[in-house]
Amino acid sequence: MIDLYCVEDDPDIAMTVKEYLEQRDFRVTVYGTLADARAALNAYVPALVLLDWNMPDGRGDSLCRFIRGNWKELPVIFLTVRGDPRDIVSGFQEGADDYVVKPFSLEVLYSRIQALFRRTGNVTKQYLSCDDITIDLERRTVFQNSVEIRLSKAEYQLLAYLLQNKGRTVTREKILEQVWDVKGNYVNDNTLTVTMKRLRDKLSRPACLKTVRSIGYRMEDTI
């Protein structure tokens, strides 16, 4: 099943899109405000975002810019009544992959989604995030609040492993085994302590990266 976010404040349109696409192997989550959609994206990156332009708490192009700043390959389709050529051009300039004007055919929307996936693939597994921290596994880059954070190889591997196990407590022994020992780089326990301190400092000691006393570490969303 493919996860999709529909950012739409009209409940009738949102429910119609949701019901139609869920009959075609999508799991659609509807968000009625940009703030709710942004929080959801920080917690989990779907395969695609359907985005209305006019929202109760702002304009959809601001969320599109936020998406492009954090997840460059995440497909975005505008669904909007704004059909003026200048609006359409502006939507593409802000980073949209497609632009569908209301009213629209559900069959056409589905075809556009399928065509987009043929070009981009499913990016869900490419991005991992926790609070305001996002990692792009394909590019091996890390962003915090849309600002790239430069990490050493060991710091990046440690963060990636913790994010891949988000919500679970990982023991220090397991981290040493998976981040260092699996590559034949045998190190002592102090190496992990030093690397973790440097990682936390570079990320401004994020609340989502927790120490589980005498056991290990856990990453979990706090906002």
Image (tube, rainbow, N blue to C red):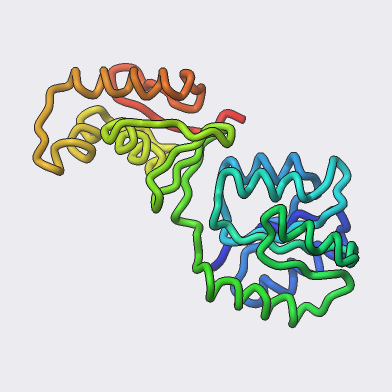
Q: Residue at x 72, y 60 (%)?
A: 92
Residue 85 vs residue 194: left or right?
right
Number of marks drawn: 0
Q: Position of residue 188 (x, y in %)?
A: 13, 23
Q: Is residue 103 left or right of residue 184?
A: right
| Relative image position of residue 25 (x, y in whole percent) | 59, 73
Residue at 14 percent across and 43 percent down: it is 183
- Residue at position x 23%, y 37% in the image: 179
Relative to 194, is 11 above or below? below
Above or below for 66 versus 138 = above
Write the residue at 49% across / 35% down: 148
| Position of residue 121 in the picture relative to residue 176 (left or right) | right
Residue 16, quarter of the rendered image: bottom right
Residue 103: where, in percent of width, then height? Answer: 89, 73
Give the vertical position of 198 relative to 58 (above or below): above
Q: Quadrant of the N terminus?
A: bottom right
Q: Is residue 165 left or right of residue 16?
A: left
Q: Residue 212: percent from the left, percent from the top? A: 36, 22
Quarter of the image where one finds residue 88: bottom right
Quadrant (top left/top right/bottom left/bottom right) for the C terminus: top right
